[in-house]
Structure formats: structure tokens, C-alpha cells
Amino acid sequence: MVDTPASALTGPAKLSRLRLRPVGIDTYHENVAYLHRDCEVYRAEGFKALSKIQLHLNGNSILATLNVVDDTRIVDCNEVGLSKSAYLQLRQLSCPPSALTCPSSPDEEVVMVTIGQAEPPASMGALQRKIMGERMTQDDLQAIVHDIAQHKYSKIELSAFLVATNRDELDREEVFFLTQAMVQAGRRLDWHEPMVVDKHCIGGIPGNRTSMLVVPIVAAHGLLCPKTSSRAITSPAGTADTMEVLAKVELPIDELHDIVRRHRACLAWGGTSNLSPADDVLISVERPLSLDAPGQMVASILSKKVAAGSTHLVLDIPIGPSAKVRSMPEAQRLRRLFEYVAGRMNLAIDVVITDGRQPIGLGIGPVLEARDVMQVLENDPAAPMDLRQKALRLAGRMIEFDPDVRGGDGFAIARDILDSGRALAKMNDLIQAQGSAGFDHHHPSLAPLCLEVNAPRSGMVTGIDNLQLARIARLAGAPKISNAGVDLCHQLGSEVQAGEVLYRVYAAYPADLAFAQQAVGKSDGYTLGEAVDLPHVFVEF
Amino acid sequence: MVDTPASALTGPAKLSRLRLRPVGIDTYHENVAYLHRDCEVYRAEGFKALSKIQLHLNGNSILATLNVVDDTRIVDCNEVGLSKSAYLQLRQLSCPPSALTCPSSPDEEVVMVTIGQAEPPASMGALQRKIMGERMTQDDLQAIVHDIAQHKYSKIELSAFLVATNRDELDREEVFFLTQAMVQAGRRLDWHEPMVVDKHCIGGIPGNRTSMLVVPIVAAHGLLCPKTSSRAITSPAGTADTMEVLAKVELPIDELHDIVRRHRACLAWGGTSNLSPADDVLISVERPLSLDAPGQMVASILSKKVAAGSTHLVLDIPIGPSAKVRSMPEAQRLRRLFEYVAGRMNLAIDVVITDGRQPIGLGIGPVLEARDVMQVLENDPAAPMDLRQKALRLAGRMIEFDPDVRGGDGFAIARDILDSGRALAKMNDLIQAQGSAGFDHHHPSLAPLCLEVNAPRSGMVTGIDNLQLARIARLAGAPKISNAGVDLCHQLGSEVQAGEVLYRVYAAYPADLAFAQQAVGKSDGYTLGEAVDLPHVFVEF
């Protein structure tokens, strides 16, 4: 029972010439084209709102979803408008690679484009077959990912792809094909060294800023660790947000290479490097759908790592009642999938299952987390021990990738590097090299408004809800307000008296604080009870 | 492995006041809101492109997907823009029901709205569970359909719903719940009679204008048949497009009721009557995805019929190599699903499986099809016999809903009504009542440009590709150009000589004709062979 899409019915594209105009609307990763309702082409061609059209400029073309406009201030009848990123794409495609300034041409420049009905993306047949329940081949996934990276899929089609490949709809071979295709669709870095190490956490645990400790430790040991991280999407801080408290993280690619060559490491934002571009597009739709299927997660993480030139990866899977992964069997299944696909991609992987029952460290929010990290690096007695321990474990596992290190010796080597101050020295080198922000972690300037959340009764802390604490920190303003967030005073197992402060919420604006307070009112995220109520530690760690 | 959506993390909505501004962009059924990047609210709230925001006006609210704007000609920093239909929705919600002119208030009127982060639609949990593979309850489907009808789903979420309920993902009980919920989410007509008959074809066969014959026949018999039809979406003509050649089809609801009361029938466009509004929203996404799953098709068709007040339905399922349904087992499965759901909805249904191997009638395109219909009504010897026969069969089955008619007598009654001219008289009554367009079917004015497509060799016509003929007619300009299209000279089983005309293509513009010719060059849609090559007739009919 297959119907034929409207666009397929139109057969060959009919071309018409219009003036190209950038429209100042950010439609995120979707290409949107704007045509006036009275535009000759719109009336003649039988375009429909949401149908896709193809725009040609100097022999290159892009696809865009059509919005119909009734306001000549947006587009005239002889113009076609393009949303911001679509405009840049078409201009960039049509420029010689050297002419980097080309896309920023003024509005007034008259550039004629031809537009026509779009043939559906070549891979739509493969997507249709997947929706109908068939298995995808290597060619299918290459075609789909290629079209996604080229922005040929509308949001509707992206969403269809994600749901059709959700749950266990992808077998592990398909996940490998997907990962491989995602790497091939973008740029791939080559560091010209036999071993390039990296670490990654699947996420969901507030505070968890181990990368900022692990990277200086393993780089001090001599491993090459060019770390690029993301900014927070749904969390109160990403590694890039936290590192930005200390130093510049948006660096030109040449400068980044130079820093890595001199210091064996970097801690930069990975956003602009066009590694696995299909992943960036897919994430823009995964996020509003709250999808995070195992196959998609594995392909997303591993494609980014391989594209970034990593050869050895330590992967952290936290388990806990409010973590992404909530049971050991689920963690084991995920581990096997990571190992299988990494193996096929020639990426050495060491999966570490960790304790995800509560936030790691005490601060939640960029400045508070940067303070925790610097305290650990300085061997400050006030430093959060759980953050230190976890970072040492992960760094130890990475150091054991070194063929000269015996299995089991990594932890001690990492601890020596940290305790001796060599990790701090390396971090200071990186901060200077990337451009210091002049952060004084001894006197971090926190957001001025503070709410103290007190224990309603005496007892042992037997639960801390990762999701609720993240929510409160975000409502307080993190990560946009870098010095807003939550600062914990008690962790699991701690005995508290009624009225004692459980944590402090910092905010810059009264409205933010009020909203955080409202969320605290619903649930403060802490459970108080007896020692027997403490959740089982899933891991040895 | 469930992540929390960004919007859920924000907890309670933060409200901020902005001036409401209509933005002249037609985003089809998706509500889109436009905020300037420098808008205080945008910066402070941590909204993201594609995140959903909620707009409140006079105690009512709508949800909209956010696009970020960098051009003050579209929205200012103290404004929030809304796409066309979203603007109307919010204004209409906020007006007293009597004030029908309210939404068309001038741009200058200052209306303050408050906006805030949107809580995800209440039914997102149910959708997530369905994506994870669970079965939906009656309450789940009611919540989802309610939110869809209220435009609370983004295109991304609609697409996710469609793919998650595609194939056989809906069991027949869920299809019933979906149908019921779709009826409940909209208006429902009541004709105050015990029997209201209707017919429907699942589509995909060009020409097939039986409704315009069946309606006057059964109305002449005395049955109440208030027929509303759709316009073409992907086909070269819908019943509404073809009827519009003869008479007005867009009628105010009062006038329509009046016509039905006086003539027992109407042949009108059903587009504006807000019957099963969720279906209209879903179709806007089904179309670009080319999805047409059995469960969705059954719910869509039956919800529209029940909402329109029908009590008895004849349903036509054509089978053929280029029809929607291509095998008898598939048709039987579909029949059972229609019968089960109709039964639960208290709708009497008679499913008729018909010959879908080729177009019905000779003309394809509004004017050409109107000519065929009028020839049949006038008992013109040149009238296409297949169209007459099929219409009589379907009308006969509808007449047998009449408790006074014996099973098997319907066909003869219908034939008498047609042969005696009573059907023609009824049709002329309807044309006059709705407002005649003055069409002269004896001398239909066809589009001026004509292409004759000739047989490349001698032989018997053993195949006519419905999809290719529809494609050629659309490229030639149908249905936008009502007198463009395809006129067949030969049907299946006809013996042709090399060079004889197979069909004529009519177009109004040279470019249209050239594109149609190009498609003919790829495939003319006809297969010539021997009698033994004729496809099996699946049905007795």
C-alpha cells in the first residue's frame, strides 16, 4: 500500500529564475525557502507549503522546504528567500573554496538562482523500506547519511528516520554501517601519530567534569589527547561551558593543532569542525523528541571520535536510579554494542561502568564545576574526593593504553601525576595556550542571589535525583549564567540534622531564583532515610 | 535509557510580555513563533531554536515552535511574531465566539501576550511509550489526538507519531480508539435522519469520478446523501475539483444544509468544515512522507465519515498492479479492518473490491472527467462504459441499504434511475442549487496545446500504468489548469495498430506540455502485448 509522494509525481524539475535573498530567520538545521504567494513560479508550478524545492546557483544546488509568504518585506514576488544556514550553504557551495568571504555578500547583490520542484532525496526509497520493516544495507545507510549531511532531509523525514531506527530496530551490523557512513560524510582529522586517546561519558550525571582532570593527567604522561567537547544541550553545563570559565574554547583549527602539537592536548569546543555533520543534524531532531536509542547513541559517539582522529577510547557508562542507564543488564548490552561497533571501526575501546547514583563533585553549573576541578588539580583538602577518584580511575585506564604500562598500574601512575602537581602544570599550560580567562578559583565570583535548601528532618542522605538537581540548576540560570547553579553540601551516605543546609542555589536574577525555588518546592531532589535504604552500588568503582 | 526533554527541564513556564505581531508566513499546519535574537525574553529564558514556547492571551494559550530572527523587519525586539494560522488560532481563542471579525484586526493594534517555556504536550508520555513499543490505551489516543487537533505537536512530533503507528504497529483496537478520538476532537454533523448514506474510494485510480454519478442516482431513489469531497492532493483531480467545473463547491454550511434538505444530496468541498481536524493535521505530514499505513487510512476515512454524520457507507477498494492495493490478500486484510472499526463506530459498511488495473473513464483532469460524467448521465453512446458500470454497481449497493430493497435488486434500480434521465435531472437540480458554472459538456473547452501519443507498434493494450498517467496529467497542468490533462483513446484489451493514437495530452502552457512530453518519453504508461499478457481480473465486477 504505497502512495507516491507529490514531488515524485512532478517528474523532472521545472526551473525558474528568481533573485536570491537571505532571510534573517534561524530555522536551525532545516533548510527553509520563502516564496511569495503571488510569485509567478509559486503559482505556476503547483508548489505546496512544505513541499521541497531545489535551488540551483552556478551549477550547485540545495534542497529546501517551502514556506509561503504574504509579506513583501520578507520576500518580493521576484525573489526567493532562504533561511540563514541554507543561504550560507548555497553561497558556500557556489564559491571557489578559497573565497571565504563570499557568503557574507551584501543583501543588495543580485544573484539569480533557478528553482524547481525537488526530486525526493535519492535515499528516500531506503528510508521507506526501513519504515516498512526491512533491514538496511551498507549502501542504504551511506545514501541516507549522505543526504542528511547535505541537508536534503526535512525535519519530518529526519524524525521518520529516527523513529524507524529507534529501540532495537537497528541490529549491530546496521549500527556499524551507520557509524561508518557518519564518519565518511564529514571531515576526518589525522594527528599523524599511532595513538590518539580520548574519553567519553554517555552523560546524564550533573557535575561530572572528569575530562578536565583526565586530559591534563594523560597528556602529562605523554599521551596525545586532543579533546573537543560539546556545550550543554539539556544539562546545566557541558565540558566546553566549564572550560570556558578558565580559558577560550573556540579556537581556529590551525591554532588548535599548534596547541596540541606543543602540549599533547587541548580542551576545546568541538562545534565548528564539521566532524560527523550528519550527527549534528540528527541531534537537532533527537533533542525535541527526547530520543536516545542505543544504536543512535553508539553511532553518534563513535562517529565523532573516529572523525576526530581518536584511536583509543575510554567510555564511561554511569548506572543509577536517575541516570540514563538504570540497570546492569542494560549497561552490559550497551557495552557489547559499543565494543562491537568500535571493533569494526578499528577503534580500541575500554568501557568502564561507573557509579551514577548521584552528581559527581559538589558544584553544578560552569563556575562551580570549574572550582571543583581546580581544587582537585591543586590537591586542595576541600576538593571533592569522588571527582578525584573517578578522574584517576578513568585516567588510569587511558594510561594503560600505553603499551609500556602494565595492566593495573594506570591508577597509581595517574595519582602520582596528580599528586606531584604535574597535572596542574599541564592544565595551566593549556589555559595559557588557549587564552586564559583569568578565573580566580580561590575566590570564584558566584551569582549574587542565594537560596539555602535545608533538610526537612534528620537522617541519612539515601538518594539524590540527578534529573531534579540538573533541572534546579538550569532554572537558576546555568549554563547561560555561568556562575549560577547548585552547590551541594551533602552527598549519599551523609548524616544530616533537620534544618541543616543540603545545598545552595545561586542565581543572577530574582525571577530565576523564584523558578528554581518553585521546583525545589515540588521536590528538593534529596531523599533522607536509614543506611539500609542506600541504593545498591552497581559497580566496584 | 530515557533522556529528559529540554522543555521538561525548565519546569514551570516563565512568563514574559511581548507585543503580538502576525508574520505573513504560511507554515501550513505547524504553529511557528518568531522571536528576535536580541529580544530580552529570548536571551533570558534560554530558549533554543526549535524549542516550543507557549503564548498566552486573555487566559487562552497556544504552543508554537520557535524560530529565531535577526531582522527587525520581521519582528522587533519587543515583539513575538506568529505564523498565519497560529495567529488566527490565538486570536480566535481569545475572542468571544460572536466576534467573527476579531482575528482580522490590523497590524497596528497592540495586543500584549505573555510567552514562556512550554510544558511538553500532555500526551508526549503516551507517544514516547508507543515509540518504545507499548500498546496505546483509549485514554492515550484521546490525549494524543486532542493535542494534535489543538496544534500542540510540532512537525517532528507528528512525524514520530506517524512512523510509530505505521505498518501494523496499531492493532485493530487501537485503530478504533484512534478513529473515535479523531471524531471526538472535531465537529460532528447531525442530519436528523435515521439513514445518511455515503460512498468512498481509497484512491489511486485516475478518472474514477463515480461519486458524481452515484450521488444523483441514490438521491433520486430518495436516500439522503450529503456528499463532501476533497480536492486533489497528489492526483490530477479530486471530486471537488471536477464538480467545480460544473458548479460552485465552496458553500457556507447553512446553504449546504438547505440544499441537502431540498434535494436529499449535495456535491460540495469538505475542506472547511472542521470535521476530524486532527486528520487534517496528520495528512499534512503523511503527504511529504508518503505514508499511507492501513491503520491510519482506516481511521482517517472512517473518522471523516462519522463526523460528517454518515450512518451507511459503501467503500471501494480497487486492486491492480499500479493501484494502492496490489493483491487480493492485502485487500481482504484491509476490508476486515474497515469492517471491524466501522462496526465499533456503529457505521454500517459494505466493502466492494473493484478492478483497479487501469484508469476509470477516458478523461483525466477536471474538465475531461466532468465531460465523462455528463456523458454517462445523458446516456450518450460515446460515454465510457466502465465508468457507467462501476457507478451503477456502487449505487446499487448503496440503494440496498434501503430496508425496502431486496439484496441483489440495487443494480437494476440504479440502472433504471440512470436510463430514465432521473439521475441527470437530479444532477441538474444540484448544479442549479449550488450555483451553475455554465459548463457546456457537449463542447468542453480543452486546453489549447495538444500532444498525441502514438502506439510504437501494433498489439493489444495489456497494461496502463495508473501512476504514470496521473503523473503525465499533473505535469500537463491538472488540476490547477482545469482543462488540462489526458484523454485516453484505448483501454485494456483494445487492439491498436502501430502509429494509432493511444491518448492525447492537453496543456495550457508550452513548458507544461514539454514536461509532460519528457515524462511520456521516459514511459508512455501503456504496455502492448498479446491477449495472454492481460493482467488477471481480481474481481468479478
Image (tube, coloured by chain):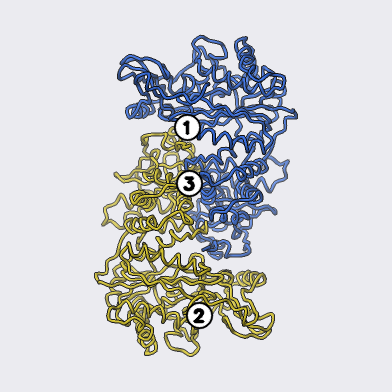
Chain colours: A yellow, B blue
Specify the subunit that label 3 lies on: A
Label 2 to label 3, Cα distance in Å? 50 Å
- Find residue B102 and report its horizontal and vertical position in percent: 67, 43
Considering the numbered disc 3 on the image, is that residue within a helix, a strand or a loop? loop
- Find residue A250 and report its horizontal and vertical position in percent: 38, 69
Q: Where on the picture, by quarter, is residue B432?
A: top right
Crowd band around label 1 with a 10 angstrom C-alpha radius: few (<14), some (14–19), many (20+): some
Q: Is residue A475 left or right of residue A40?
A: right
Indicate which label's residue lies in the foreground, 2 or 3: 2
Q: Which residue is labeled 2 in the image?
A: A361
Specify the subunit that label 1 lies on: B
Q: Which residue is labeled 1 in the image?
A: B327
Crowd band around label 3 with a 10 angstrom C-alpha radius: few (<14), some (14–19), many (20+): many
Label 1 to label 3, Cα distance in Å? 50 Å
Q: Residue at x 44, y 28 (%)?
A: B466
Crowd band around label 2 with a 10 angstrom C-alpha radius: few (<14), some (14–19), many (20+): many
Q: Amino acid at mark 2?
A: Gly
Q: Which residue is labeled 3 in the image?
A: A74
Can marks 2 and 1 be said to lie on one chain?
no
Considering the numbered disc 2 on the image, is that residue within a helix, a strand or a loop? loop
Q: Where on the picture, by quarter, is residue B84?
A: top right
Count up the numbered dots. Answer: 3
